[in-house]
Image (cartoon, rainbow, N blue to C red):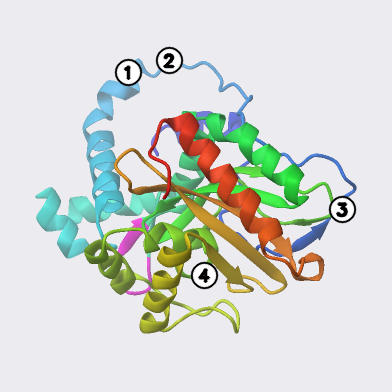
Amino acid sequence: MSQSSQIKDTEPTQLDGQFPDNLEASEGADSLNDGVVKVTTEPRKTSLATNAVKGAAAFSKSIAILQMIADSEQPPSISMLVRQSNLPRPTLHRLLKALAAEDMVELRPNKTYAVGARTLQLAGRALAQNDLAKIAAPEMSLLSAQTQETVHLAIRSSNDLVYIYKKDTPHAVRIASTVGARVPCHASAVGKCLIAFLSEEERIRVVDSLDMRRLTDFTITDRNDLLAEFEKIRKHGYAISHQESDLEIQCFATCIFDRNGQPAAGVSISVPIYRLKTNRDEYLKPLLECRDRIMQKLGCAQVK
């Protein structure tokens, strides 16, 4: 944005916007993503009064466009944004180009616009410090201790999920993931959970908007197969992803529901295949108990 040049040299290092979900060796030191992320770098103090007045109109329009894109049920085209914003096409195109240059929005191959990686990264950092992450942190830490594996807390952002908390396994071989990273919902246990427990109408609408690209040979790419998977998830109360986003990783996940019974977040356990225990209950029992404790702390209705 217009002020980015003033704060560029004081910004903390950006998190990786992609989630490889593969394995990396560690010497055992705690990950920077272990727990709620706290940004400690203080930006340089500057006076923005003059520039704020001068650029207020363009800034407000840019924020409004970003909000429209974020609120859209599916990535909008520039024609759709012209209709919604009532801005002249040249003006809209200029603002979109500026947002894209800052990675706040992204132009997809089909000429539609989606929220960009930088927006999601910033959201991930902020969300990592919100009440949900703070309340869930002790329970997530306990879940990791019980299973000896990496655990994540995530929310859905359009057709992706965004990690807002991570607790690493104590093992030397760990999952290479970061707070703020995003993963396609159709290829992850948490993402499938967060869609499965939507209303039927909303569930179908989301599925129809998914770009069900194949990430591995195990990724579900057929619409009917995914809908059938959702029925199993709703029946059992949890989801499993077997090497669907990356090879050699299996994940177990379940939903945290809000006070209206809607999926608000997901809790997951990520396990390298070579370390996977035969008895699934060794993961599922502590996972579901963790979910219940978090919901109890949040004052939400318990899952029956």
Disc 1 residue type (three-letter): Thr
Q: CA distance from mark 4 to mark 1?
A: 47 Å
* Residue designated by label 4: 187
Of label 2 and label 4, which has the lower sequence position? Answer: 2
Of label 4 and label 3, which has the lower sequence position? Answer: 3
Q: Are the two marked residues, 2 and 1, in contact with CB atoms closer than 8 angstroms?
A: yes
Q: Nearer the viewer, residue 13 or 200?
A: 200
Which residues, given as a range, are shown in magenta? 108-114
In the picture, measured across the screen, residue 297 lies left or right of residue 36, that is left
Q: Which mark is residue 47?
A: 2
Q: Taking 91 as reference, is 211 above or below it?
A: below
Q: Residue at (14%, 56%) from the top-left corner?
A: 82
Disc 2 residue type (three-letter): Ser
Of label 4 and label 1, which has the lower sequence position? Answer: 1
Mark whose residue sits in front, 4 or 1: 4
Of label 2 and label 3, which has the lower sequence position? Answer: 2
Query: Magenta includes 109?
Result: yes
Give residue 282's position: percent from left, percent from top.
71, 57
Q: Residue at (22%, 65%) from the top-left corner?
A: 201
Mark 3 crowd level (few <14, some 14–19, many ≥20, 10 Å Cα): some
Disc 4 residue type (three-letter): Ala
Q: Nearer the viewer, residue 136 or 205?
A: 136
* Residue designated by label 1: 50
If the image is split into quadrants, where does the N terminus sit? top left
Q: CA distance from mark 2 to mark 1?
A: 8 Å
Disc 3 residue type (three-letter): Ala
